[in-house]
Amino acid sequence: MAKITDRQMTAKPGSSDKWLSEVAIWGHGSLVARITPSGERLFYFRYSNSSGERITYPIGTYSRDGQEGTMTLAEAGQRAKELAGLHKAGIRDIREHFEAEEATRIAAREAELARLAAEKAAIEAEQAQQASRKSVTELFEHWAKIDLINRKDGGAEVRRMFEKDVLPFLGKMAVADVKKGHITEVTDALLARGVNRMAKLIFSLMRQMFRFAVDRDLIEHDPTASIRKAKIGGKVVERDRVLSDDEIRALAKLASEAGLLSSTEAAIWIALSTCCRIGELLNTRWEHVDLTKGIWLIPAENSKNGKAHNVTLSSFAIHQFEKLKILNSHSKWCYPNTDDSGPVCSKTVTKQLGDRQRQPSQGVMSNRSAKAQALLLPGGKWTPHDLRRTGATIMTAQGVLPEVAERCLNHTEENKVKRTYQRHSYTKEMAEAWQKLGTHLELLMSHLPPLQRE
């Protein structure tokens, strides 16, 4: 039969494959069709290769009137004619010819993709190189915008530390030029000032910033990586400073003569009698203090662990808040800043107390208190946080269970099982603990002259 017809191609399938073929084109191969029992209608080009082997090479599937398939009967005939032409021209192995062509196309495509990838890598490397030429100050601003902004204070305290102790040394340097020696130059300056803990803290912050840069391909290596934190200022000794009863009595005498702000004096006794963190006190608004009911709410946004904390105020603590109220009743803040736009800096009280505990050999700092030794106590330097620890220690000495004292400190329970299943609030026990602490402080103060008790 000379030609395959559409009628043959659309015939009902049989129980076995039905083959249809046309006369060979120029004696160099012919169009062949196969109708399978499942209804598939397939086109092939049949030819003899250079070894005389008959090859049936698939070229497509039958399509008519918009039905599924890759080519019409006429298109299949034209394709067979093209392949016969190749065979006539000397290409005896049609299949191998197209496989070789496909391999060539694949190789060319892969080579092009590799070229594009290399170009992209080169562009990214150039961008990274340009980024690494950014200054450390620019890196800090990038880090502040992405990471520090998520801190409770929006990164304000870290910014203050960097602007004081890091950026003056490194700020103008390109990030890629910062080496180990530049990092130690910063920490050595801090160690020379005797602020070892601050040196460790700032080193940790610099490491966070440079690792941030590595994560974003701004630099390849963290310049702090080979520096051991333990080598910065030696081993950190956990503070365990607790003021004795005699020191508390002495403090009451010294505080009144130390040239402190009256509000700072009140802060000392509030911190001691409530075991609060000094930052929680300095950020307090009067709306959270109920002196009639004797309750002080520390809202979640002010507490370190993000959990609201109710403090039952003893009469001793209420008296201190009443003195503070007289001083700052004009503001919504218990400790307003100079323009009453918010609370004072959380470091204010700590600095005032530290300025008055300098050893005689350290002299007096300019623009700071002239009474540099006014608050020195026999047991050594003390901080507002030591007052918190002292208050909790007095509680347990008065018979308060350690677990209750921990609740008064608003510490998060470390034991997960207890944290999950122990739901007793300890409200009553905590109130009794604060009252015992206040009573003990009143007893200590009762031996002082009236002016110093005030």
Image (cartoon, grey):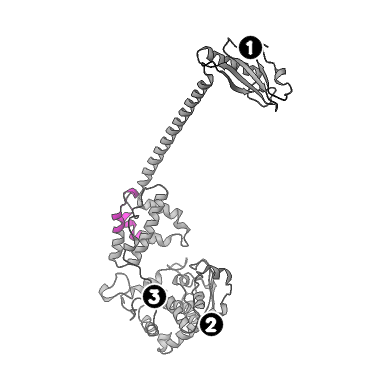
Q: Which residues are magenta?
A: 163-184
Residue 172 magenta: yes
Q: Quadrant of residue 85?
A: top right
Return the mark for residue 240. Answer: 3
Q: Residue at x 32, y 54 (%)?
A: 170
Cα–Cα gap, marks 2 and 1: 110 Å
Helix, strand or loop for the magenta stretch, by majority: helix
Sequence-first tag of 1 and 3: 1
Q: Nearer the viewer, residue 352 or 438?
A: 438
SS state under label 3: loop
- Decide: is 254 above or below 36: below
Is residue 407 visible in this depiction of the protein?
A: yes
Q: Tag 2: residue type? A: Glu
Residue for badge 1: 23
Q: Quadrant of residue 10?
A: top right
Residue for badge 2: 432
Q: Quadrant of the N terminus?
A: top right
Q: Tag 3: residue type? A: Asp
Q: Residue at x 30, y 52 (%)?
A: 179
Cα–Cα gap, marks 2 and 3: 25 Å
Q: Percent position (x, y) of residue 124?
A: 41, 40
